[in-house]
Amino acid sequence: MRELRDSSDIEVPPERVWAWIEGLADNYTSWHPAHVSAEWERGAPNEVGSVLRAVEDLGGHREELRFELTAVEPPRRLDYRLLGPISLLLPRGSFTVIPTTAGSRFVAAISYRFGRLTELLFRGRTAALRAHMREEGESLKLILEGERRSGPCPDA
């Protein structure tokens, strides 16, 4: 089993990053231009066993993904497993929020089962997934740091 991992340092407290993750279904389409939709298909948001159904464009392909939450540890970690045929290649992933002196580090990880032949056949898809994860991290940084800078308006 191998893993793709991307991390972004974000200058907001971990609780702010976690609050954004808790609203994942509502925040999904603003997170990345390739994200089409997301909704909770089963269960309550952010509870183990709940399933999030998401649609996104990845490397020129429209993907319907279903994520079942397997562990939720506020405000630090959310683990999931992918459901359906894609789980044969991409069985699980996680979002982790790590406190830093400047704020937080957001880490996205996804495990994959690619042998040498599979990796050669899906090289473009792997590159697209890696780029997508990097873009998500950069976007989350911009979203959350932009919210921090704009903040509430002072009373006049």
Image (cartoon, rainbow, N blue to C red):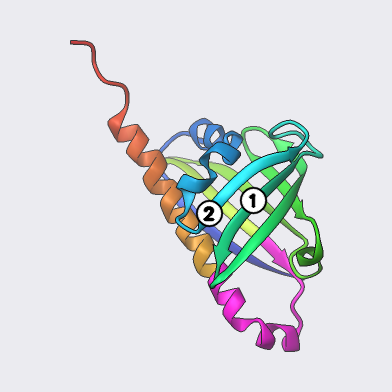
Does residue 125 sit above or below 145 in this rendering? below
Q: Which residue is mark 2?
A: 35
The residue shown at (63%, 38%) is 76
49 left or right, relative to 136: right
Residue 150 image offset from top left, x and y in percent = 29, 31
- Identify the image quadrant of residue 74: top right
Q: Is residue 11 visible?
A: no
Residue 50 image offset from top left, x and y in percent = 77, 39
The residue shown at (72%, 37%) is 72
- Whether 41 is among the magenta residues is no
**How many residues crowd mark 2 within 10 Å: few (<14), some (14–19), many (20+)?**
some
> What is the span of residues highlighted in magenta in the rendered image?
110-129
Outermost residue, top side: 156
- Determine whether the residue tagged by mark 1 lies in a helix, strand or loop: strand
The residue shown at (76%, 82%) is 115
Circles 1, 2 touching at the beta carbon (< 8 Å): yes
Does residue 56 sit above or below 58 in this rendering? above
